[in-house]
Amino acid sequence: MAEGRLSGRKVAVLATDGFEQVELEKPIEALKAEGAQVEVVAPKGGRIQGFNHHDKGDAVPVDRELANADPAGYDAIVLPGGVINPDELRLEPKAIDFVRSFAQAGKPIAAICHGPWTLIDAGAVQGRRMTSWPSLKTDLKNAGADWVDEEVVVDQGLVTSRKPDDLPAFCRKMVEAFAEGRHEAG
């Protein structure tokens, strides 16, 4: 494991079938490059299926099943996009509880594209300045977020971006926020 700003930090990447391939892989690469220990957490064990927009991508191994993942054991969480992935996670009460625990503890959260959908169900967007894939704009505003169309937005440890093209800025700000650690719980 590389030495870096995130050495000694453990990060959960919460995903399920239908995640956007690059939105899971690039953040994991950036986190590992800075020394973080990263675990892909999913509602089921084995492998989860990635997508490259509408086309099937690669399957990724799950490091820990959600039922066996204790949020207290992680310092931060990443929520990749893809339309199917966050939509499925929203139907999993354990996934919503898992995400909610990070928000309530003031732990850093990074969500890209459709990933912020899960944050709505976790009650973690009220009063937060954030961005997302444009189709989530109304959902986020209705949930009380201040939605803006920007490459990357950071609000008290919550890092959000719109799409795969934003990944360089998203990963840079994600690493910075995760290195800062906890913020006041919202």
Image: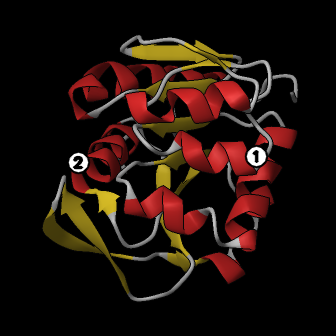
Question: Residue 109: horizontal and vertical position, in percent?
Answer: 62, 37
Residue pointed to by mark 1: 102
Q: Amino acid at mark 1?
A: Phe
Q: Do we see residue 28 in this rendering?
A: yes
**In this rendering, position of residue 39 left or right of residue 92:** left
Alpha carbons under labels 2 and 1: distance apart: 23 Å
| Horizontal arrangement in the rendering, residue 73 relative to residue 114 (left or right) | right
Taking the image as shown, residue 165 lies to the left or right of residue 83, namely left
Q: In front: 68, or 155?
A: 155
Looking at the picture, tell me which residue is in the foreground, 40 or 86: 86
Residue found 57% across the figure and 15% down from its top = 154
Pinpoint residue 118: horizontal percent, then vertical percent: 62, 50
**Residue beneath label 2, please?**
22
Could you tell which of marks 2 and 1 lies nearer the N-terminus?
2
Rendered residue at 38%/25% (across/down): 170
Quarter of the image where the C terminus is located: top right
Q: Residue at x 76, y 68 (%)?
A: 70
Residue 8 in view (yes/no): no
Q: What element does badge 1 sit on?
A: helix
Secondary structure beneath dot 2 equals: helix
Q: Viewer-proximal residue, 137 or 164?
A: 137
Residue at x 15%, y 66% (from the top left corner): 57
Total number of numbered labels?
2
Q: How is the model colour-coded?
A: secondary structure
The quadrant in which residue 96 appears is bottom right
Locate residue 125: give its quadrant: top right
Q: Is residue 164 above or below residue 122?
A: above
Q: Which mark is residue 50?
A: none
Q: Quadrant of residue 146?
A: top right
Q: Position of residue 34 (x, y in %)?
A: 40, 35
